[in-house]
Image (tube, rainbow, N blue to C red):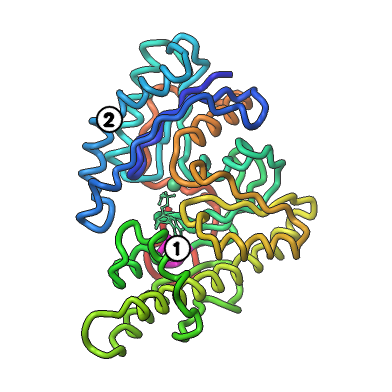
Amino acid sequence: MLILGIETSCDETAAAVVRADAPKGERVVSEAILSQLDEHRPYGGVVPEIAARSHLDHIDTLVAQAMEQAGAGFADLDAIAVTAGPGLIGGVIVGVMTAKAIAAVHRKPLVAVNHLEGHALTPRLSDDVPFPYLLLLVSGGHCQILAVEDVGRYRRLGTTIDDAAGEAFDKVAKMLGLGYPGGPALQKAAERGDPRRFDLPRPMKGRPGCDFSFSGLKTSVRQTVEKLPPGPLTPQDKADLAASFQAALVDSVRDRVKKAIQQFKELYPHGTALVTAGGVAANAPLRAGLKALAEQAKLDFVAPPLKWCTDNAAMIAWAGAEHLRRGAAASLDFKPRPRWPLDPDAPKSTGAGAVKA
Ligand code: KG4
Ligand code: ZN
């Protein structure tokens, strides 16, 4: 089963060809990806209009590259899978239009993939993790804990009531003048810092449920900066603030995941693994904390390779394949969806503020 995947929902334009019936390790036949980081850097964040135009400029070339590297023609494909949401709508439309055109011209089945489902099923692409498993999805736009029961069956155990974890990393890094994207820069600065110098809050720690909140922590960092002597922050101040922030965030996430593991084990006694995905899953102290929690709970800990944790098209092709195996393909008239929750039945989160898709 040979599938072309297309991903354009945020700031990565990506195409990949996946052979879904190959053994793990041999499935991803080709990948072409273009990050828009440089285009958004001057603005300190993703600008939707710039993103959409850039996707439009590059998607055809990237699809051609992926096909060429795979040594395949469109006629060889069994299907095309495309991110149909949630995400920045301009970009999603570009991907969906491209995929529909290829599918229509070459008379191939088309699968509309939920981007979050792409992340959620990645541990099966990389490691054949059996259902059910517990997923922590932490990126710039998403922050959720999900029980993955089966393809298309997700139970949301927790979500953020304000910012996503990556958003908090990015905003604090900007505050400290550490550069964009903030997560990797902040982790690096924190390596030279003292995590005990500033006593920052651990949001939601000890609270019932598994929801997250990071906006209060971000405000505390700002207030701490304001209390320091006037003038630019010294490199040591920056490193200590970065280390203290990272320790507080990791501590808070660990507490939430620990609660989620308890719930997961009650709901699914045969659950197999704790897995993580999303850009923030690259954070080394967070990974170490999650691994320890999984070991205590006698669950496997699976973190897919970094290039498949962040946004990519291989995960979209794979999710498409998982649906096709179960007989699902979309008609050509589906519409892109800016919002598309994985678990539509999930109760509203416990706090005010925008909840990320
Ligand atoms: O999954 P991703 O590439 O894009 C989406 O947001 O969908 O995630 C990007 C996010 C950014 O907020 C970035 O700062 C964060 O992941 N990130 C990290 C690290 N590497 C990337 N955050 C903390 N530590 C890292 N090492
Ligand atoms: Zn993503």
* Horizontal relation, residue 138 to residue 333: left or right: right
Indicate the secondary structure of the residue bearing disc 2: helix
Q: Amino acid at mark 2?
A: His
Mark 2, other Cα within 10 Å: few <14 / some 14–19 / many ≥20: some
Residue appearing at x 23%, y 30% in the figure: 57
On screen, residue 147 above or below 31: below
For residue 235, which quarter of the picture?
bottom left
- Residue 128 bears which disc, if any? none
* Image coordinates for residue 320, horizontal then vertical, percent: 53, 29
Instruction: Name the residue at 35% across, 29% down.
Output: 96
Residue at the image point whose x is 57% and y is 22% from the top = 19
SS class, disc 1: helix
Q: Are marks 2 and 1 in contact (CB under 8 Å)?
A: no
The chief SS type of the magenta part is loop
Mark 2 or mark 1, whichever is nearer to me: 2
Q: Give me the C-alpha separation between circle 2 and circle 1.
A: 29 Å
Q: Which residue is mark 1?
A: 165
Which residue has dot 2 on it?
58
Depicted 210 relative to depicted 141: above or below = below
Callout 1: CB less than 8 Å from ligand 1: yes
Specify the segment rendered in magenta.
Answer: 160-166
Q: Which quarter shows the N terminus? A: top right
Q: Amino acid at mark 1?
A: Ala
